[in-house]
Amino acid sequence: MTGMDHLIIAADAALRTLFAKPRAARACPTLPELDSELSAAEKAQSGALMRVNHVGEVCAQALYTAQALSTKNRALRAHFMHASTEESDHLAWTAQRLDELGARPSLLNPVWYAGAFGLGLLAGRLGDRVSLGFVVETETQVEAHLQSHLSRLPANDHASRAIVAQMKDDEARHAVDARRAGAQELPAPAKALMRAAAKVMTTVAQRI
């Protein structure tokens, strides 16, 4: 494919992520034997947390699309696109759960997407090993973030907890896959900057 082809694919991915109803290839994780009966306050808490998780999946689509666009390595491009496909399941699951909770996605999703796409391009321009290192650190931080959500979600919100648990397992595997593909360890200041940016995003996304 030509460079223009890749740009068209990237533009299509952005439009689908931001404006189309996401569809999952895998069934949404559930605990059918357990009901998620929630009070109004518990629904609000779960909705805020799942909105943050949905934003994370919007950003994941942007990151992987940009990294696939940046690399000249066909095998690595396929690696990024496969991970993006799995992340699209997460996008669909979190969107579905937001609907069930009567909550809305973040109003700033186009901003989050643009920022994450820019970071993905930057990581890709720094070389494939750095780009993979960025994946490792991103997924490691996301895994920790999801673990914190498991402790903050209402104990009886079994539906949200099942989704978050599966997402956490998938993110951990993506980090392992990136290490095996030759990821380079990022310097401590870069990791700290990524944590600070994530903190801003999660704080704002809970409300807006």
Image: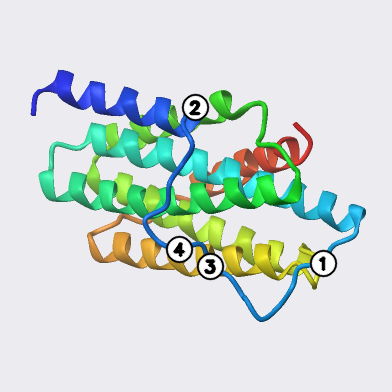
Mark 2 or 1: the one toward you: 1
* Quadrant of the image containing the C terminus: top right
Mark 1 or 3: the one toward you: 1
Q: Is residue 153 left or right of residue 19?
A: right
Q: Which residue is mark 2?
A: 19
Separation of residues labelled 4 and 2 (CA atoms): 22 Å
Amino acid carrying label 2: it is: Phe
> How many residues crowd around disc 4 within 10 Å: few (fewer than 14), some, or many (20 or more)?
few
Q: Which residue is mark 1?
A: 37
What residue is drawn where x is 49% and y is 37%? 21
Separation of residues labelled 4 and 3 (CA atoms): 6 Å
Q: Say which of 43 and 55 sits in front.
A: 43
Q: Is residue 208 above or below residue 127?
A: above
Asked which secondary structure carries label 3, the reply is loop
Asked which secondary structure carries label 2, the reply is helix
Amino acid carrying label 1: it is: Glu
Disc marking residue 27: 4
Amino acid carrying label 3: it is: Pro
Find residue 63 and report its horizontal and vertical position in percent.
40, 39
**Where is residue 152, by image quadrant?**
bottom right
Q: Is residue 73 left or right of residue 205?
A: left
Asked which secondary structure carries label 1, the reply is loop
Are circles 1 and 4 on residues that touch, CB within 8 Å? no
In the rendered image, the residue lying farthest to the left is 1
Q: Which residue is mark 3?
A: 29
Residue 39 at least partly seen:
yes
What residue is drawn where x is 24% and y is 40%? 127
Separation of residues labelled 1 and 4 (CA atoms): 22 Å
